[in-house]
């Protein structure tokens, strides 16, 4: 008999996320993965600064709250404190990972640090009330780009998977989304792979999850999921950007092989 | 290992850290402390430890945060501009009650400043440096031997009180070579049941965190932390007192300034001037009692510093301004000569006769 139940790695507490926010789905996928791999007792999670700052109250494994953007450095420390026994993951948003924490992200990837990163890209700063993110789309209206993001003034969005795929370091980079049942199942597969890679000692694995923020996008949850299809995915194409073990590389590395 | 070895102050810190059981070091090159990183880079791989050159000072202190959260002894080192970068992390370490050892081998500032010795990060070290109400234990060695000894003490105090210990050294002591003995008694490391080492499905999950959105809770947490600080102030303040008992004039100096000052005190004593030296070894907690006691008989205090006058404020506070305190200083990487300090003592003695 199949029973739809709460994953054991997820604490039995109400989450604080807004209605329609996809953080809840991704939390669940991470927790299911931890359950299925039987690693809760050896997993340490690193929460970011941003909407998921209180993820430390939601996952049942040991948790650390990092300062803004520094989660990959903290994870590096934790992993290296006991590399044979601990499984370490960070859970970070786009402001945290792709703006203030860019250096920590890039260098953890360059070192092929054996950690797992779950990267939530919803193209906006949620917790502070909807400001422009490094991943906000050209033309996107936010509190700090009230006339729409103008690339002439503030440049272009950072495409994290594409950027990191040019590095020799990382093992696995994939972009997924969670706006449909099919996509949620695919995201689960990617997240599980990112944890399995760490268990197998393969190294830096990052899954970028294109997510929705109905509250700060000013949409209903349904409209927000559709906006992912209409606007986000054309700019941030889904797929595997690097998988060393499967022989999938970025162009420049393909050429140099 | 009772034999003495000749080494640089920075190397003595690194070797002492290893002997104290530290197996994780994260750093970033900056003069004049890079010998610590170089020593660790050589030694750590040979003893199953971790040396990692981080991408920045900020990353290094956050790697320290990670290892400390996981319950292991860990350190980083830097010099003044690098410590400014680490200050965010120092505040988070304090907020999460994590132990760590951080070395600041000071150079002249502000800004990029210079690469010669300085003591101008006294305020930054003793007042916190990062944001929020917090302190670090600040230890001020004045010899290569003390670089080693205070490193071990720093780790032990950090673990005991769950906070950062900072070795506030300077370019001179970091770079100079002296014989040093590593014949230390090292205490067994204490248990850290709060550490995030994985639940092993045997306990509730541990959380290392500095976020308290409930103001009442954050207030209580701060007050509790300050109760711990009060215990440290009561128990851990140390100073070397030299010829203080009958002194009319007290020279107050730490680190390399104290080495210079001791020569001047000896010279003045030979001239019959009743002068003594108080050398704070802990800068936080500041050895207030030593100064309060001295102020009962001393008529003047001269504070000798490689700064525009920073410790002088703590000297005035701890003596409640009962005794006039003057400043004898050099800055920018310059060091006062024994003669400059001697002249300041003679000057003070003349004033006292009037």
Image (cartoon, grey):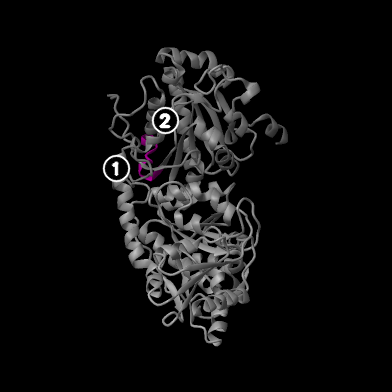
Where is residue B32? Give x, y as percent: 63, 61
Kindly state the secondary structure of the residue where label 1 is placed: helix
Up/down of A51 relative to A109, above or below? above
Q: Going by the image, does A252 lie left or right of A10?
A: right
Front in this rendered view, residue B58 or B116:
B116
Q: Which mark is residue B217?
A: 1
Q: Are marks 1 and 2 in contact (CB under 8 Å)?
A: no
Q: Quadrant of the C terminus of chain A?
A: top right
The image shows residue B161 at horizontal and vertical percentages of 36, 59
- Which region of the structure is painted magenta? A35-44
Q: Which mark is residue A51?
A: 2
Circle 1: is it few (<14), some (14-19), or many (20+) Cα within 10 Å?
Answer: few
Badge 1: chain ID: B
Q: Is residue A83 visible?
A: no
Q: Spatial distance from mark 1 to mark 2, Cα to Cα?
A: 21 Å
Q: Residue at x 59, y 46 (%)?
A: B55
Examine the structure image and report whether residue B174 is included in the region drawn in magenta: no
- Pointers 1 and 2 within a single chain: no
Q: Position of residue A107 (x, y in %)?
A: 59, 42
Of residues B50 and B75, the one nearer the viewer is B75
Rendered view: A71 above or below B117: above
In this rendering, is residue B287 above or below A104? below
Task: Looking at the picture, tell me which residue is in the foreground, A143 or B8.
Answer: A143
Q: Quadrant of residue A235?
A: top right
């Amino acid at each position: 008999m199949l029973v739809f139940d709460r994953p054991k790695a997820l604490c039995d507490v109400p989450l604080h996320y807004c209605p329609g926010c996809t953080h809840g789905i991704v939390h669940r996928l991470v927790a299911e993965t931890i359950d299925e791999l039987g690693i809760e007792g050896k997993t340490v999670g690193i929460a970011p600064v941003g909407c998921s700052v209180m993820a430390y109250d939601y996952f049942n494994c040991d948790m650390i709250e990092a300062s803004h953007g520094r989660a990959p450095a903290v994870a590096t420390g934790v992993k290296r404190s006991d590399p044979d026994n601990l499984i370490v993951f960070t859970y970070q948003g786009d402001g945290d990972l792709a703006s203030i924490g860019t250096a920590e992200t890039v260098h953890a990837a360059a070192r092929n640090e054996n950690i797992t990163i779950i990267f939530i890209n919803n193209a906006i700063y949620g917790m502070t009330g909807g400001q422009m993110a490094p991943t906000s789309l050209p033309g996107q209206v936010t509190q700090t780009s009230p006339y729409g993001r103008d690339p002439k003034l503030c440049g272009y969005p950072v495409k994290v998977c594409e950027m990191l795929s040019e590095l020799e370091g990382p093992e696995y980079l994939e972009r997924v989304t969670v706006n449909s049942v099919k996509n949620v199942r695919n995201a689960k597969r990617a997240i599980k792979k990112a944890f399995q890679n760490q268990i197998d000692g393969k190294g830096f694995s990052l899954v970028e999850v294109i997510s929705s923020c109905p509250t700060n996008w000013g949409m209903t949850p349904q409209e927000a999921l559709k906006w992912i299809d209409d606007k986000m995915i054309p700019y941030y194409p889904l797929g595997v950007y690097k998988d060393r073990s499967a022989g999938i590389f970025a162009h420049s590395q393909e050429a140099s092989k | 290992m009772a034999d003495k070895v000749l080494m640089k102050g920075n190397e003595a810190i690194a070797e002492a850290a290893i002997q104290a059981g530290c197996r994780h070091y994260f750093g970033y090159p900056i003069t004049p402390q890079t010998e610590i990183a170089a020593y660790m880079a050589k030694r750590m791989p040979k003893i199953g430890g971790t040396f990692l050159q981080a991408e920045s000072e900020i990353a290094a202190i956050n790697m320290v945060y990670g290892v400390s959260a996981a319950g292991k002894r860990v350190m980083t080192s830097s010099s003044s501009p690098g410590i400014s970068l680490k200050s965010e992390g120092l505040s988070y370490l304090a907020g999460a009650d994590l132990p760590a050892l951080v070395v600041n081998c000071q150079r002249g500032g502000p800004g990029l400043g210079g690469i010669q010795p300085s003591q101008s990060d006294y305020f930054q070290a003793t007042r916190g440096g990062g944001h929020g109400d917090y302190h670090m234990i600040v230890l001020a060695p004045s010899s290569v031997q003390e670089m080693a000894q205070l490193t071990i003490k720093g780790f032990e105090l950090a673990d005991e009180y769950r906070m950062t210990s900072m070795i506030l050294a300077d370019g001179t002591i970091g770079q100079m070579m002296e014989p040093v003995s590593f014949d230390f008694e090292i205490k067994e490391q204490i248990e850290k049941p709060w550490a995030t080492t994985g639940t092993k499905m045997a306990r509730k999950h541990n959380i290392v965190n500095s976020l308290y959105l409930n103001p009442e809770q954050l207030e209580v947490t701060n007050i509790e932390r300050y109760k711990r600080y009060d215990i440290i102030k009561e128990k851990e303040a140390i100073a070397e007192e030299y010829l203080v008992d009958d002194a009319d004039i007290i020279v107050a100096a730490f680190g390399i300034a104290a080495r210079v000052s001791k020569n001047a005190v000896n010279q003045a004593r030979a001239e019959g001037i009743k002068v003594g030296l108080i050398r704070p070894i802990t800068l936080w907690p500041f050895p207030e009692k030593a100064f309060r006691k001295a102020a009962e008989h001393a008529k003047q205090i001269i504070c000798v510093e490689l700064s525009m006058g920073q410790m002088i404020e703590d000297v005035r506070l701890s003596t409640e301004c009962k005794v006039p305190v003057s400043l004898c200083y050099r800055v920018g990487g310059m060091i006062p000569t024994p003669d400059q300090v001697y002249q300041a003592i003679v000057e003070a003695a003349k004033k006292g006769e009037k």
